[in-house]
Amino acid sequence: MSASAPLEDVADALAEHADDGIDFDGLVVEPADGGYRWETPDEQVTVGEDGLRERADDPYATNWYYWERVVAGHDTPRRAFLRWLEGADDLGVPERYDELRGGHTRSWGELAVTAVLSEGGRRRYEVRHEDDLGEDVDAYTDPLEARHLVKHDDEGRYRPLSTAPSLPHGWAFVDLDGGEAVQTVEYVYPATVSNWHREREGDLDVDHWDEVAERQTGIYGIVEQLDGDALEWAAEACCVDSQCLKRREWDESDDEELDVPRGDGEFPCREPCSLFVAAARKFTTLEREESREYTFELTPAEKEQLEDIVDAVADGRTDEIREADVNEGANRYRARFLRAKRMDDRGLSGTPTYPEDHE
């Protein structure tokens, strides 16, 4: 993409293309009566070449120049994303320019991507964590840096799933052109822009679970044995907004939908990811076990406490529970008290997991 679009370049481009005609985002320019018809939603006049050049600073002219000469790339994911970013399909040029002067921001996963109007109608972009809007954070300009910045969460833990809602804070990519902005987004959330665009164009190829499971080999070949109920439990565990920001578009098969929320993410998930397959392998082995009946001695409060502990772990809330909050069932001291009271070397309530081993 061009580094700049000064008004003389806009004027030259208008003069160059006027004979062939321009029809873009509300601007029409075409030969008429020895000059050119200039038409926008606000005016319609006939001008000569000089009059055409004098309109180089018109928002409709600079907008046309930016998209047709700077961005270019018709039918590309990059162009579609940048136009979506500023609401080009919903807002006219004057309304967009009003928004862009103050910075127009849209969310993409946990990212806030901001477009700002700059010299000659060009745009500059900024990408940061949405929680960091308005905050003073470390600034970067090389999109490649994003690959390293998002590998670990705020606690320094490795992020095996790039679209997990655990994006670290404290950075911003600033003063980017359009290509750099899209590249930064794709480094943070790989393939999301391209898959989003393919879905919009009706070209998203979805691989359902039955297809993905069938092509697994080696230690993962057993995932074909995961039954429909367990697959739904697995999707509920792994593929909801609290765990992944993609919107699930795959199902059990072409004919069998999963009765699990798909998520509200802007970008689609076209097939079960490798992390889901790895989890499904473990779930398959767990589902091979036959159920057993166990007898535990618990008070009603202790039963509810165990349920609180499961919920807190499943929802990732254990770090939020304060040590002093002993009214919370998953409080560490409450859990340690329950363990001291109800568990011994045979397990919960003195009941061995495999009673036959203790006969």
Image (spheres, rainbow, N blue to C red):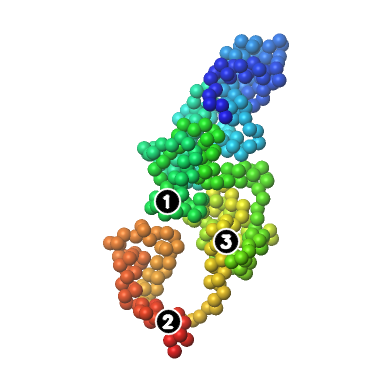
Between 15 and 146, which is closer to the camera in this rendering?
146
Say left or right for 156 vs 87. left
Is disc 1 placed on a helix, strand or loop?
Answer: loop
- Disc 3 from disc 1: Cα separation: 23 Å
In the rendered image, the vertical position of residue 122 relative to residue 326, given as above or below = above
Amino acid at the residue labelled 1: Asp
Is disc 2 placed on a helix, strand or loop?
Answer: loop
Q: Where is residue 163 in the image (x, y as percent from the top left)?
A: 51, 50
- Disc 1 from disc 2: Cα separation: 38 Å
At x 53% / y 26%, what residue is drawn? 3
Provide the residue designation for mark 2: 352
Dot 3 or dot 1, earlier in sequence: 1
Q: Where is residue 212 in the image (x, y as percent from the top left)?
A: 64, 59
At x 54% / y 76%, what residue is drawn? 289
Image quarter (top left, top right, bottom left or bottom right) of the C terminus: bottom left
* Quadrant of the image occupied by residue 316: bottom left
Amino acid at the residue labelled 3: Val
Is disc 3 placed on a helix, strand or loop?
Answer: helix
Provide the residue designation for mark 1: 153
Q: Where is residue 302 in the image (x, y as percent from the top left)?
A: 36, 73
Dot 1 or dot 2, earlier in sequence: 1
Provide the residue designation for mark 3: 277
Q: Position of residue 26 (x, y in %)?
A: 62, 26
Image quarter (top left, top right, bottom left or bottom right) of the N terminus: top right
In the rendered image, the vertical position of residue 86 relative to residue 211, given as above or below = above
Amino acid at the residue labelled 2: Pro
Between 304 and 242, which is closer to the camera in this rendering?
242
